[in-house]
Amino acid sequence: AQKITQTQPGMFVQEKEAVTLDCTYDTSDPSYGLFWYKQPSSGEMIFLIYQGSYDQQNATEGRYSLNFQKARKSANLVISASQLGDSAMYFCALLNNAGNMLTFGGGTRLMVKP
Amino acid sequence: GAVVSQHPSRVICKSGTSVKIECRSLDFQATTMFWYRQFPKQSLMLMATSNEGSKATYEQGVEKDKFLINHASLTLSTLTVTSAHPEDSSFYICSARDRGQASYEQYFGPGTRLTVT
């Protein structure tokens, strides 16, 4: 069974500062993937970044980077230079080896203060 | 590219009626589509996996007779909530995988907010 945990229900960050959103996971699959999505109040799921379990380097996409620590089973999202538009819910998700099941964490609400 | 649409975006129906939600991949073919439900302030929960031309696979605890899924073509899957009750009120989101790519990524629709009165 897959499990994914986000321990921070809500976070505040000052505009222009960096913030780390925590995500830990548990799976017995030999290969898996980790995603981060942003969900603004309108509800759509916006893909941010992906990390494969065998990827040697941590994924980066613009202001987003994923701090992947496989031995600790963590995949934290780092957002640099926060913007007001970053205020949203953020979900970490685990994709199984077969690629047909995506399990979501409980989410973290990020609020960027001006 | 990789756009998924959902229709309607918002629907209000009376208790006991049925409502159909459509999920379309606009610029790619999707052999597999997924249906999720999200209650207020909660996470997304996978309801079922829909494969083109075959029966959907439902997650444990999801009533297949209540949530009818049809994936009749490579670009369309529908979710019908039958005999809806107020507890079915939720945000329903579909996603699709691109048949033409070996990619892992699921492309999400914008969601449908269902309110049952």
Image (cartoon, coloured by chain):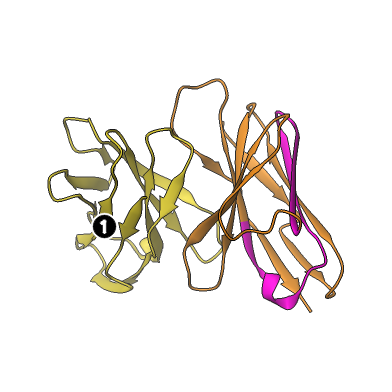
Chain colours: A yellow, B orange
Residue A56 or residue A27, whichever sits in front: A27
Quarter of the rendering occupied by the C terminus of chain B: bottom right
Asked whether the viewer can see residue A110, the reply is yes
**Chain under disc 1:** A
A102 relative to A82, above or below: above
> Residue B21 in the image: x percent, y percent?
75, 53
Quarter of the rendering occupied by the N terminus of chain B: top right
Residue A63 or residue A44, whichever sits in front: A44
A95 relative to B62, above or below: above
* Stretch in magenta: B66-92
Q: Crowdedness of circle 1 by 10 Å Cα count: few (<14), some, many (20+)?
A: many
Amino acid found under the numbered disc labelled 1? Cys
Looking at the image, residue A64 sits to the left or right of residue B73; the answer is left
Asked whether the viewer can see residue A114, the reply is no
How many marks the image carries: the answer is 1
The extreme left residue here reads A71
Q: Which residue is at 55% across, 20% downward? A: B100
Q: Which residue is at 79% across, 69% downward? A: B84
Q: Is residue B68 magenta?
A: yes
Q: Which residue is mark 1?
A: A23
Q: Is residue B112 magenta?
A: no
Q: Quadrant of residue B72?
A: top right
> Residue A59 in the image: x percent, y percent?
24, 38
